[in-house]
Amino acid sequence: MKRTAWPPCAVTVLRRGAAVAAALLAVLSAATVPATAAETPTRDGIYEELGVADQPVDYVVLVDTSGSMAADGRYGTVRSTLGVFLDGLSDTDHVALITFDDRPDVRYIGSAGNPGKIVSSLPKAPNPTGGTDIGSALDRALRELERADAGDIASVVMLTDGKHEPPRGSDYPKASGASWDDLRERADALGKRTELAGYALPLGSGATGADLLGDVVENSLVLRPESIEDLSGYLRRAGDNTRARSAALLLAEDNGKGVTASWTGTGARDLTDGSATASVTFRSATRHVPLTVSDMRVSVDGVPLRVTGVPKQLTLKPGESREYAVRLDGGPQAGGLPYRRTEDGGATLRVSGQVTSPWQRALAPDVDLKVPDRVGVTGDALAVRAEVGSVYFLPAVCAALAAVLAAGSLWWLHVNRPRLRGVLTAVPVFVEAIPERIALSGRRVNFSLREGGRGTVHGRRRRTPEGSRVDLLIRYTPAGASGRPNEVTCEPGAHVVVGGLSFTYLPPESAAGSGSGAQAVAPGTGRP
């Protein structure tokens, strides 16, 4: 019975092979994608660049030589077209050509470098009485691939036009059983140490035996050509599948690797003048696959900057690094307080764009290049700094504050220390004496009296319904007294008593009329 539980990797390969095989009903020329421009890579060119042709591959070709192969010129077509398949192989490839009818016969084992010699080793005609022992043929094919020096990639190509009809005494009397289970176990063990695939080509409508290859080798593809003339195309397709598997195995180490970008160099960039230069390096992390970044744009986070100087499209060879000098316009901002200072910041690199490989189109669908579609950013943010704000801001603020303070001082002086004018007289209460005259000038007057007392006088401006006026604030300490001085306010023309003295405030117009010989103030009366 056929096995149906195939591993995901085998199912994937078979689906890809089936999808392509349906379109290949004519002779293929290495299944390349036609180049539309000189720079568009072809599959053959990629294989050559990868050196896939130099990677040894083991081929076991099983050719049915039972009597039925003589019908419809099938055997003659196999002989003539097998050379086309062998021409596509490399000299380093290993070929085992085995015919089978009642039993398998090894016709050739050695290098694939001489296709003519290999084809000439085929018998000139099939065995007219021979049966079809597919089990024994597959056993011989596995023994060939189990040798110690077998390659890492192996293919079994089987061409048959019938079903499994072994002779008496065969180890494979039926199309199932313990002997077939043993074949499957051997193929599974072989598949763990090599990339093993099978290609079965049924050459007639009744060639159900071709399906038995898929029962033994899990990663198998049964091709179904509509006529014997398609054999050449399918043989070449089998060879190309093997080369595609070689390429896929080699390119697997590039899966998930893409393009990275980072700032180059160290040290902060000075953006005081609004612009500076820096360097951005783009690196390809692949070993084999070229990469292209399309619609590329570079920006930054963290500092308002515009970055220019990178191309819109960039193609990197495997492992290549390319550095670009970029221009930075912008920089740290002064903010709400535009005083002169140094602002530091970090510009985190951001790169947008689509990452692809020019090889993807040529290798699809047999080789799936898993290329990250975005540019990865590595490294630290770029340090930037700028002298921001105006050098005149702080001096202007200081000047404004000084002006405010000066204005405030003048206002305070105007209100609390107005210039004094007129005369202040002082006379003891209840004692007849000539008043002492204290001339008022300046903003503050210190006075000493005959009685030994001392004091100070300053003015305070007040608003009244009649207009502005200056009152006197008199502080007086009698002779021999201690502690804080007595304090009293005297309006213009008024009399006040403090510390045993009667003070009279004579404004300028009143002081002029009083004269130097003014009468003494009557004791206790406050009047002359």
Image: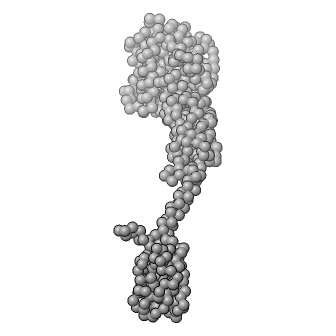
Q: Residue at x 55, y 55 (%)?
A: 396
The answer to whether residue 278 is seen in the rendering is no
Q: Quadrant of the C terminus?
A: bottom left
Q: Quadrant of residue 171?
A: top left
- Taking depth in this image into account, of 427 and 111 the one nearest to the observer is 427
Q: Residue furthest top?
A: 72
Q: How many labels does the image show?
A: 0
Q: In which quarter of the image is the N terminus?
A: top left
Relative to 264, say whether 522 is above or below: below
Q: Which of 260 and 365 is in front in this view?
A: 260
What kind of colouring is applied to the model shown?
one colour
Q: Nearer the viewer, residue 180 or 312?
A: 312
**Relative to 100, is 46 on the left or the right?**
right
Residue 22 in sight: yes
Residue, x 58% and y 20% (percent of image)? 39
Image point (50%, 63%), residue name: 407
Q: Nearer the viewer, residue 461 or 33?
A: 461
Give coordinates of residue 196: x percent, y percent. 51, 28
Look at the picture and state if 447 lies above or below 391: below
Image location (x, y in percent) of residue 344? 57, 51
Q: Is the residue 466 above or below the residue 435 in the image?
A: above
Where 503 sits versus 346, above or below?
below
- Which residue sits at x=55%, y=86%? 448
